Image (cartoon, rainbow, N blue to C red):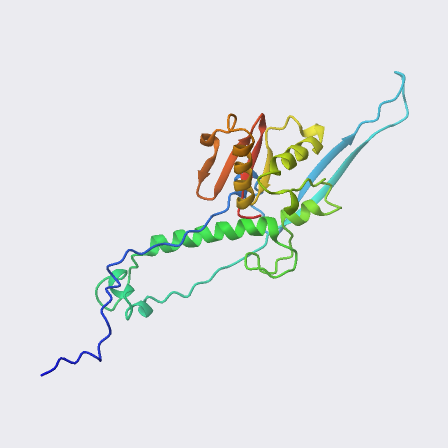
Amino acid sequence: MSLNVSALSDFNNQIAGELIIKMVYAGSTMEYVTIQEGVKFQEPINLFEVSLHMQNGTCISSASGSATFTQRTIEVCPRTSFDALCLKDLDKKYLGISALAPGSYNETFALATQYSELLVNQFQKANDQFLWQQVSGSASTFGGTCAVSGLATIISSSTSGVVPVVINAASSSAANILTTMDSMIATSSADVADRDDLTFFMSVSLFRNYLTGLRLANNFYFDPASVTNRPGLYEMKYPFQPNVTVVGTVGL
């Protein structure tokens, strides 16, 4: 008598292995910006600027200078994610044993916490990408077709009132990134030189180049302990510039 097992699949104990949750680099830009809360659809940001014009003499009656009031409208961009998760679909898979309670009436899901945390991380990542990269009316995986533009578009616009100082691909290697960043500081407005919130925003890969550049330039002033590395955040102070922070963000 022979033993015929050809109708059986090789055994694979799928519930014995550890379930590894995918790593997602969550965004961090929201920690560095002012958030306008309570906006339903649109709301203006009111801007005020004074232009001072000095004249000779003391008893002057002719007007000089100006006080200018302007507005910039911010708009809420509604976005939705919908997952049709049917626990009954898991009954016939290994998850029916490892992630569901015994029986065929499913009321609990053992992976609910991990599932929700992964969704939150992906939302944070998509929000960071949206904040920087969204182009008004263009379809994207992180913003849909919202009629708003991200920071990269706003800053580079000739009508934004902002003078952009940007690191480009040709000057982003570890060998020259510090020279580029020093040039950016030197060409920034002297009026904001004493601000304590001056920030370099760059991609995670550029931040790594920046750290390598510091190490190669002079290991004596590079303190590895000064680098804050936690989920969704790469941050450190720029050497010899105590009011300048360097941030690596997934949004860029």
Residue 222 picture location, percent across and down: 51, 29
User: How many labels, in total?
Assistant: 0
Q: Nearer the viewer, residue 239 or 149?
A: 239
Residue 34 picture location, percent across and down: 58, 39
User: Residue 61 vs residue 242: left or right?
Assistant: right
Residue 248 picture location, percent across and down: 53, 41
Residue at 35 percent across and 53 percent down: it is 114
Q: Is residue 223 visible?
A: yes
Q: Is 152 rendered above or below residue 14?
A: above
- Write down the quadrant of residue 16 in the picture: bottom left
Residue 148 picture location, percent across and down: 64, 53
User: Residue 19 vs residue 64: left or right?
Assistant: left
- Write down the quadrant of residue 209 in the picture: top right
Q: Residue furthest top?
A: 58
Residue at 34 percent across and 52 percent down: it is 113
Q: Is 2 rendered above or below residue 10?
A: below
Q: Is residue 106 visible?
A: no
Position of the N terminus by quadrant: bottom left
Q: Nearer the viewer, residue 75 or 172?
A: 172
Q: Residue furthest bottom?
A: 1
Q: Residue furthest left?
A: 1
Residue at 33 percent across and 70 percent down: it is 89
